[in-house]
Image (cartoon, grey):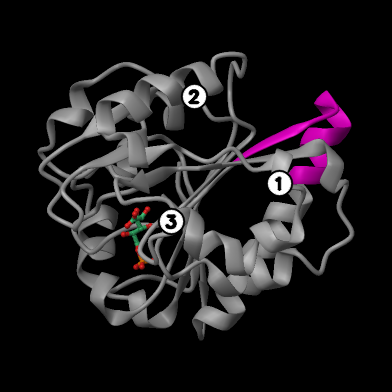
């Protein structure tokens, strides 16, 4: 079952998402002594991370993993880990962020990252974004990567540049203990309305989701609710 939380602006949705992340990080660390968190790329999560880094958390017990990475050279401004650096990575120990080596190319980087995460039976939190076509991480509608059951998959022919990417797979996201999506802007109202109407996309193929969205994403949704 999806749980929808709707806020006036992205700012409030970001704060609420940060509160929810912190609450579940603490619960994971209390239950298992560690928390493995998948984090999104794109632009939307920046303010959420700004709120999160101000919280009192057991940072030494949290490990962070990109949900996907774009096959650009290291340091390329369009890489997710470069965008994450400003808002999150600058505030955590380097050893606690596990980058995808997408500069190696999709296949080789996916193989290497499967080894990186092989000891993790299930991520505690999968924090994701969503594109206007219903993609999440680098899992795009109709893409062959959706059929790949490995834990980390090589993506080609991505409709969102660059064409080559590396992504956590549908299975890995499905097996996460908890999934949350932060999305905002009128551009995403159409896809959210279709998701609410029951149409299937990669983002809502991963299991129950805690949605944090702003009113601009609203089409014909009630303020908050489940479905
Ligand atoms: C990527 C992201 C992707 C992103 C969505 C939303 O590499 O592009 O991982 O899944 O989360 O496209 O992006 P915005 O937050 O910029 O709208």
Residue range of the region highlighted in magenta in the rendering: 25-37
Real-space CA distance between mark 2 and mark 3, rounded to the nearest whole angstrom: 23 Å
**Sequence-first tag of 2 and 1:** 1
Q: Is mark 2 within 8 Å of ligand 1?
A: no
Q: Is residue 178 visible?
A: yes
Q: Is residue 4 visible?
A: no
Q: Residue furthest bottom?
A: 8
Real-space CA distance between mark 2 and mark 1, rounded to the nearest whole angstrom: 26 Å
Q: Residue at x 39, y 57 (%)?
A: 79
Badge 3 element: helix
Question: Of the numbered discs in the image, which one, if any, rests on residue 80?
Answer: 3
Q: Which residue in the protein does label 2 denote?
A: 175
Q: Is mark 3 within 8 Å of ligand 1?
A: yes
Is 222 a magenta residue?
A: no
Viewer-proximal residue, 127 or 208? 127
Q: Main secondary structure of the magenta part?
A: helix
**Above or below 174: residue 212:** below
Asked which quadrant contains residue 63, the reply is top right
Q: Position of residue 56 (x, y in %)?
A: 89, 59
Viewer-proximal residue, 165 or 211? 165
Q: Quadrant of ligand 1?
A: bottom left
């Amino acid at each position: 079952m999806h749980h929808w939380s709707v806020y006036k602006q992205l700012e409030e949705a970001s704060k609420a998402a940060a509160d929810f992340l912190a609450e579940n990080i603490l619960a994971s660390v209390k239950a298992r002594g560690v928390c493995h968190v998948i984090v999104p790329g794109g632009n939307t999560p920046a303010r959420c991370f700004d709120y999160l880094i101000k919280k009192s958390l057991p940072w030494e017990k949290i490990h962070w993993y990109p949900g996907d990475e774009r096959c650009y050279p290291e340091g390329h401004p369009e890489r997710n880990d470069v965008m994450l650096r400003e808002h999150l990575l600058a505030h955590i120990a380097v050893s606690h962020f596990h980058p995808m080596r997408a500069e190696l190319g999709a296949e080789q980087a996916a193989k290497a990252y499967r080894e990186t995460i092989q000891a993790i039976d299930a991520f505690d939190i999968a924090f994701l974004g969503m594109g206007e076509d219903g993609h999440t991480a680098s899992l795009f509608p109709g893409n062959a990567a959706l059929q790949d059951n490995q834990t980390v998959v090589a993506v080609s022919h991505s409709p969102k540049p660059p064409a080559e990417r590396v992504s956590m797979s549908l299975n890995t996201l499905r097996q996460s203990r908890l999934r949350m999506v932060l999305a905002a802007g009128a551009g995403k109202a159409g896809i959210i309305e279709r998701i609410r109407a029951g149409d299937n996309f990669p983002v809502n193929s991963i299991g129950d989701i805690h949605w944090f969205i702003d009113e601009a994403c609203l089409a014909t949704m009630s303020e908050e609710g489940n479905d």
